[in-house]
Image (tube, grey):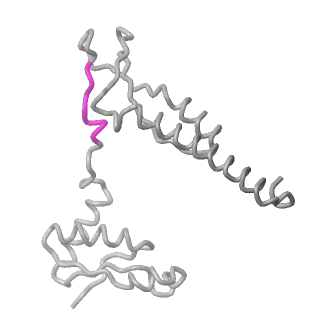
Amino acid sequence: MLVTIGHYLNPIEAHIIRGRLEAEGMPAYVQHEHHIWAKWTLSLALGFVKVQVNSQDANAALTIIEQIQAGEFALIDEDESETHCCPRCGTDKTVRVNLYWKLALCVAVLFSAAVPYSIFQMKCCECKHSWTQKALRGYPLWYSAFAILLISSSFVVFDQALYYLCKINHWNDWCI
């Protein structure tokens, strides 16, 4: 016989719990998931999305859910787990400095296009030495420059093409 051990508003939360329970070796089932995906407003009437387990596994499942809510299964962030040492003085008291957010903001405002850009600079708190973390850079700098150039040139080409199309077809009332 199945016993309901949790009610969740979101089916994704229910599947996270189900996945953890199955990883611990007990079969778990998610009920009313498809009803909620189809019409979210039914969630209150159905009693939300339910996670169910066998009755003999109920106490162990509730213990696992408490451990999940306490954060015992949380993953360590990779960026926080690494310690960066200053190449000049060797201290580990460093701070990440992102200098190019102003450039990305200006590009986004001027061209109305979001250009993802990430380059990380580290700065030593003791000797004030700055260096670039090449291992954290997602892609080369010329990718962003190429994207900016491509977006701006395509805008100019589209504008000129529309201008000449209007001029050839005499669409004066449509083209301003």
142 relative position to 148: left or right: left
100 relative position to 167: left or right: left
View extreme (front): residue: 168
As displayed, is residue 105 above or below residue 33? above
View extreme (bottom): residue: 1
Q: How many marks?
A: 0
- Residue 80's spot in the image, x, y percent? 30, 36
Q: Quadrant of residue 30?
A: bottom left
- Residue 122's spot in the image, x, y percent? 36, 22
Q: Quadrant of residue 110?
A: top right
Residue visible at 49% across and 28% down in the picture: 100
Residue visible at 30% across and 77% down in the picture: 5
Residue in front for this viewpoint, 112 or 16: 112
135 relative position to 47: left or right: left
Residue in front for this viewpoint, 99 or 103: 103
Q: Quadrant of the N terminus?
A: bottom left
Q: Quadrant of residue 109?
A: top right
Q: Which residues are magenta?
A: 78-85
- Residue 70's spot in the image, x, y percent? 30, 56
Residue in front for this viewpoint, 110 or 56: 110
Residue visible at 25% across and 14% down in the picture: 87
- Residue 77's spot in the image, x, y percent? 30, 43
As displayed, is residue 19 above or below residue 163? below
| Residue 18 colored in magenta in the image | no
View extreme (left): residue: 25
Residue visible at 28% across and 63% down in the picture: 66
| Residue 79 colored in magenta in the image | yes
